[in-house]
Amino acid sequence: MTGGAGHLGCAAAETLAELGAAVVIVDLDATRCAGVADALRSRFGVPALGLAADLARERDVRGIAPRVATEFGRLDVLINCAALVGTSGLKGWAVPFLQQDVDTWRQALEVNLTAPFTLVQTCTELLRRNGKGSVINISSIYGVVGPDWSLYEGTSLGNPAAYGASKGGLGQLTRWLATTLGPEVRVNTIVPGGIARGQAPSFVERYVRKVPLGRMATEQDFKGVIAFLASDLSAYVTGQEICIDGGFTAW
């Protein structure tokens, strides 16, 4: 099951479908969920279900596991990748620190950190059934390092405090869950670097200079590690944060 039908969420869902898994896509946008599910069924011939849910609402989150149990009777892999990100159009979000809004901070933590906590909690029984459950959380390099503000000069891009704080919290939640849910459930985090999505050329040029591999990421760069963490290839891996950032955090 993948939480989030954005670009990275779709790549995660495709990865699982390519491996032959039945896939559940959860996102706020019901139309997008249904479209992604239809595309997966058509392309890979696997069962796929789109579930619309507002991950900022606890009631919606707690309703997901019962639907999965009813439809499929099991859950082997849970990927938490829905999040408010730097480009989300929220009041007092991607603005200078002194203008950042407390209510928006709370909303970000609710989606980026509380929703994964609640979703894992409500899915634990399903994940434990076969003794090989895997939770994959999607974090960010900004949950590991602080922002270099020179990258953003002259652009409309931002890096809100709540984004980094929530993603840093997700890394610690991963370690806590790994030591709590093992041995039946493994919990790991993928830490993506910057993904090319039409950012300002000045930002891309400055960002790439900080990347040893000399480019920004694409969604395809994450499919291998998702397949690794979802399968028995990583049967002895838990509690880890794996940076997929072209070496950005290696300096």
Image: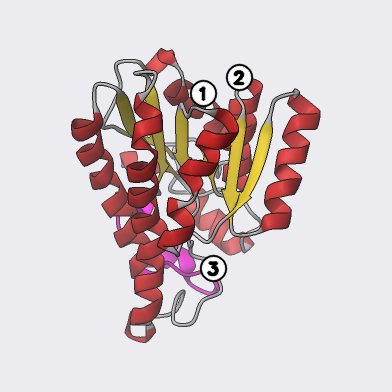
Q: Residue beneath label 3, please?
A: 88
Query: Which quadrant would the C terminus be assigned to in this image?
Result: top left
Lower sequence index among marks 3 and 2: 2
Nearest to viewer (mark 2 / mark 1): 2
SS at mark 1?
A: helix
Q: Which residue is mark 1?
A: 227
Q: 146 or 242: nearer the eye?
A: 242
Magenta region's main secondary structure?
Answer: loop
Residue wearing tag 2: 19
Amino acid, disc 1: Ala
For label 1, the crowd category at 10 Å Cα-Cα, with few meaning under 14, some 14 to 19 and many 20 or more, is some
Where residue 139 sits: x, y (%)? 39, 47
Outermost residue, bottom side? 99
Q: CA distance from mark 3 to mark 1?
A: 28 Å
Q: Is 113 placed above or below 246 here? A: below
Q: In terms of image quadrants, where is residue 23?
A: top right
Residue type indicated by callout 2: Leu
The answer to which image quadrant residue 216 occupies is: top right
Asked which quadrant contains residue 138, the reply is top left
Q: Is residue 208 left or right of residue 175?
A: right
Q: Earlier in the sequence, mark 3 or mark 1?
A: 3
